[in-house]
C-alpha cells in the first residue's frame, strides 16, 4: 500500500471512502494520480461483519452526536440520530441495499417540470440524462447491476411474492426483482447472492457491491492509493488566492496532521460534507468554504419515505433473502394527476425482529404493540422512496453550543416536511395498503420514516454560482481545486435510490479532473 | 434513576407495584410513560427482549443465516399460498 508524505502537495486528497469517494479514488488511481483518502471509520471486511442488527449498527453506523429539529417525525423519534449512515471504510455502501436505478430525464429538470411550487427552492440540474447516460452505463457495468449488461435478475423471495401478487392485482404493470448491485451470478471475483438477509449489516458473501471490497482494493493494487482509516477531517485549508492547499485532520491516535494536496474532493455524505465546509470558514471565506452562495447546508433532502407492512394469516418470513427483493416502478413515472409533484418507487424491505421492535412504531409499548410484533413471521414489508422537495430552510447547520470530541461544532439537521412530501407519503401509504389487502392482509401498518439513509443536496450543483455550491462537474464555484464528490451535489433528489447516480457522477468527475489536469486548469 | 422510579411506582400504586393486577399496572405506567425513567426502561427492554435469541424462537425469527449458508437453500422463496411470479419478473436461482 502506498504512503505519501504529508507535505507532498501533488496528491489528490479525497475525504470519505463511500460510493462517491471510493469510486473516485479508484478511477483517479487508474489514471495515474496519487490519491490520499481519509476515512473517519475503521476497516472491516465480510469476515468481520455480523448477521446481527444491533451489533452491526454499533460496528458500522455513524454514531457521533448530532441534533435534529423541524416537523419531521425523525426529530421526535430519533433526535440524535437524524441519519442512518456509516462510519467505516466503504462508507454507506457497506449498509446500502443495492437498488440501482437511473434518474429519469424529467427529474433533472425539476424546476421546469413541476414549476415553482410554493415553499420550495426547486432548480433544474445543470446536466441532463444525456450527459449521464454513458456514465450510468459504466457505473452499471462496474457495479454489476442486474437487468443490465445481460446480468439476470435476482430470484425473488417470499416478501417479493407477496408484493408481486398484490401489485399486479391492483393493476400495476412494472413489478420485478429490481436492478440490484447484487450478483445473481458470480462476477468480478465476487460470489452470487446467498439470500442471507442482513444486506444492511454488511454483506458477508460480498455479493453486494461495496467500495470496501471492489473499488478500494482495486485502487490499492495500483500502488497509488494511500488510505488512512480512523482519520477525521477537521478543516480544509486554503492559500491567499483562495485555492485549497490541504486538509487538517485528526489521525487514528487523535494527533492533528495537515496533509497537503493539489486537489481536494469532499465525499463525506451530505451532513458531514456540509459541516466540513462550514467548519472551514476563514477570514477569506467567513461563511464557510465555497459558500458565497449561502447554499452550503441548505436544500437538505432525504426522500419522502415511509413503509407499509402487511400482516397475513399465513407465514411470510420476510427476513429471508435480499432486503430489497423487488420493486414496483409504476408510481415513479411523471404523473401530475395524483395531487403532488414527483414520483416514488415501492421496494420491498424487511427488518429482523430486533429492528422491527425498534422501528415499526418508535416509542410504542404495551399490549397492542406487543400483539403486532407477535405477528412478525406473517409480515411483509415495503418501503416508499420518492422525490422530496428542496427547501432553503431544510438545512445542516453548525450547532451553536455543542461540540464534538475534536472541539468542533456538531451538526444540526433541520427538516420540515413540505405539503408535497406529506401528500406523496399519504398516497403511498394508501397504495401500499391496497397492495397487501388485495392478497388478503388482515391488517396493514403505516410506518413513519426511519433515520435518513438517503441524504442529498447540501452542496448542490447549479448553472449559476449564486444558486448553488458546485458546477455540473461537482467543482465548487468558488474554489476551483475543490470538488464535491457525493450525494450532496444533487440539485434535486429524484425518486430513485441515490447510490448509482453518486457512482456515475464520480466516474464522470474523475474524467473531468484528468482532462482539466492535462489542460493545467486546476 | 431506576431506584427512584421504582419507589415512585410503589408509592403511587399504594403497595408493591409488582403484585398489582395487570390492568392497574398498565394504568400506573400510562401516568409515567413520558418520564425519563419509563423511557429508559422501555427502550432498554425493547432492545434486550426482542434482541434475545430465545425470544426469537417464539416469534419464528431465525436470525443469522451465514452459519448455514444463507436462506438460498433454507426457505427464502418457500411461500406456497400465492402463485409464483412469472420468470421474467422473478428469475430462477443460479
Image (spheres, coloured by chain):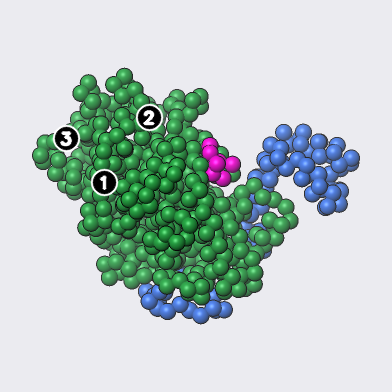
Chain colours: A green, B blue
- Image disc number at residue A522: 3
Q: Are marks 1 and 3 in contact (CB under 8 Å)?
A: no
Image mark 2: chain: A
| Residue furthest out toward the top | A283
Label 1: state its secondary structure. Answer: loop
Q: Is residue A280 magenta?
A: no
> Magenta stretch?
A69-76
Check disc 2 and report the residue beneath it.
A278
Residue nearer the viewer, A112 or A247: A112
- Image disc number at residue A224: none
Residue nearer the viewer, A31 or A409: A409
Label 2: state its secondary structure. Answer: helix
Residue nearer the viewer, A30 or A457: A457
Asked if residue A483 can be seen in this view, the reply is no
Spatial CA distance of label 2 from label 3 is 23 Å
Q: Earlier in the sequence, mark 2 or mark 3?
A: 2
Labels 2, 1: front one: 1
Amino acid at each position: 500500500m502506498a504512503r505519501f508524505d504529508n507535505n507532498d502537495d501533488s496528491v489528490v486528497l479525497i475525504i470519505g471512502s463511500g460510493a462517491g469517494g471510493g469510486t473516485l479514488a479508484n478511477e483517479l488511481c487508474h489514471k495515474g494520480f496519487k490519491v490520499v483518502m481519509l476515512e473517519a471509520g475503521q476497516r472491516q471486511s465480510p469476515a468481520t461483519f455480523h448477521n446481527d442488527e444491533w451489533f452491526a449498527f454499533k460496528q458500522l453506523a455513524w454514531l457521533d452526536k448530532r441534533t435534529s429539529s423541524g416537523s419531521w417525525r425523525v426529530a421526535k423519534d430519533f433526535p440524535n440520530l437524524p441519519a442512518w449512515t456509516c462510519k467505516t471504510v466503504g462508507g454507506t455502501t457497506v449498509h446500502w441495499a443495492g437498488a440501482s436505478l437511473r434518474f429519469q430525464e424529467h427529474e433533472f429538470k425539476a424546476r421546469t417540470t413541476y414549476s415553482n411550487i410554493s415553499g420550495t427552492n426547486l432548480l433544474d440540474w445543470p446536466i441532463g440524462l444525456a450527459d449521464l447516460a454513458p456514465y450510468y452505463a459504466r457505473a452499471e457495468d462496474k457495479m454489476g447491476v442486474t437487468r443490465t449488461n445481460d446480468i439476470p435478475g435476482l430470484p425473488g423471495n417470499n416478501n417479493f411474492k407477496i408484493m408481486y401478487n398484490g401489485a399486479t392485482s391492483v393493476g400495476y404493470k412494472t413489478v420485478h426483482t429490481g436492478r440490484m448491485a447484487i450478483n445473481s451470478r458470480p462476477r468480478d471475483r465476487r460470489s452470487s447472492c446467498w439470500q442471507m438477509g442482513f444486506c444492511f449489516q454488511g454483506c458477508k458473501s460480498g455479493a453486494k457491491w461495496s467500495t470496501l471490497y471492489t473499488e478500494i482494493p482495486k485502487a490499492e493494487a495500483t500502488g497509488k492509493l494511500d488510505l488512512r482509516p480512523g482519520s477525521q477531517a477537521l478543516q480544509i485549508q486554503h492559500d491567499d488566492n483562495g485555492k485549497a492547499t490541504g486538509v487538517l485532520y485528526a489521525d487514528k491516535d487523535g494527533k492533528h496532521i495537515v496533509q497537503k494536496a493539489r486537489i481536494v474532493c469532499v465525499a463525506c455524505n451530505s451532513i458531514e460534507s456540509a459541516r466540513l465546509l462550514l467548519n472551514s470558514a476563514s477570514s477569506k471565506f467567513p461563511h464557510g468554504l465555497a459558500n458565497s452562495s449561502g447554499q452550503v447546508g441548505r436544500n437538505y433532502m432525504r426522500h419522502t419515505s415511509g413503509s407499509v407492512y402487511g400482516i397475513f394469516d399465513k407465514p411470510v418470513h420476510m427476513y429471508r433473502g435480499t432486503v430489497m427483493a423487488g420493486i414496483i416502478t409504476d408510481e415513479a413515472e411523471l404523473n401530475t394527476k395524483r395531487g403532488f409533484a414527483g414520483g416514488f418507487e415501492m421496494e420491498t424491505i424487511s427488518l429482523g425482529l430486533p429492528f422491527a421492535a425498534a422501528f415499526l412504531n418508535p416509542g410504542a409499548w404495551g399490549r397492542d404493540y406487543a400483539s403486532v410484533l407477535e405477528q412478525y413471521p406473517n409480515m411483509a414489508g415495503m418501503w416508499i422512496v420518492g422525490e422530496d422537495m428542496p427547501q432553503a430552510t431544510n438545512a445542516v447547520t453548525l450547532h451553536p453550543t455543542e461540540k464534538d470530541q475534536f472541539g468542533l461544532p456538531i451538526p444540526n439537521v433541520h427538516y420540515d416536511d413540505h405539503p408535497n412530501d406529506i401528500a406523496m407519503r399519504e398516497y403511498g401509504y394508501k397504495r401500499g395498503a391496497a397492495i397487501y389487502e388485495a392478497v388478503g392482509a388482515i391488517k396493514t401498518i403505516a410506518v413513519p420514516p426511519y433515520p435518513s439513509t438517503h441524504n442529498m443536496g447540501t452542496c448542490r450543483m447549479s448553472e449559476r454560482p449564486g444558486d448553488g455550491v458546485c458546477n455540473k462537474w461537482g467543482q465548487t464555484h468558488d474554489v476551483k481545486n475543490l470538488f464535491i464528490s457525493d450525494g450532496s451535489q444533487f440539485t434535486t433528489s429524484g425518486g430513485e435510490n441515490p447510490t448509482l447516480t453518486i457512482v456515475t457522477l464520480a466516474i464522470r468527475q474523475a474524467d473531468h479532473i484528468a482532462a482539466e489536469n492535462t489542460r493545467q486548469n486546476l | 434513576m431506576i431506584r427512584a422510579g421504582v419507589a415512585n411506582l410503589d408509592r403511587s400504586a399504594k403497595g408493591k407495584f409488582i403484585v398489582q393486577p395487570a390492568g392497574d399496572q398498565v394504568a400506573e405506567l400510562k401516568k409515567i410513560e413520558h418520564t425519563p425513567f419509563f423511557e429508559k426502561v422501555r427502550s432498554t427492554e425493547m432492545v434486550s427482549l426482542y434482541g434475545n435469541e430465545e425470544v426469537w424462537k417464539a416469534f419464528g425469527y431465525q436470525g443469522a443465516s451465514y452459519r448455514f449458508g444463507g436462506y438460498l437453500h433454507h426457505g427464502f422463496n418457500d411461500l406456497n399460498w400465492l402463485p409464483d411470479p412469472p420468470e421474467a419478473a422473478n428469475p430462477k436461482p443460479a
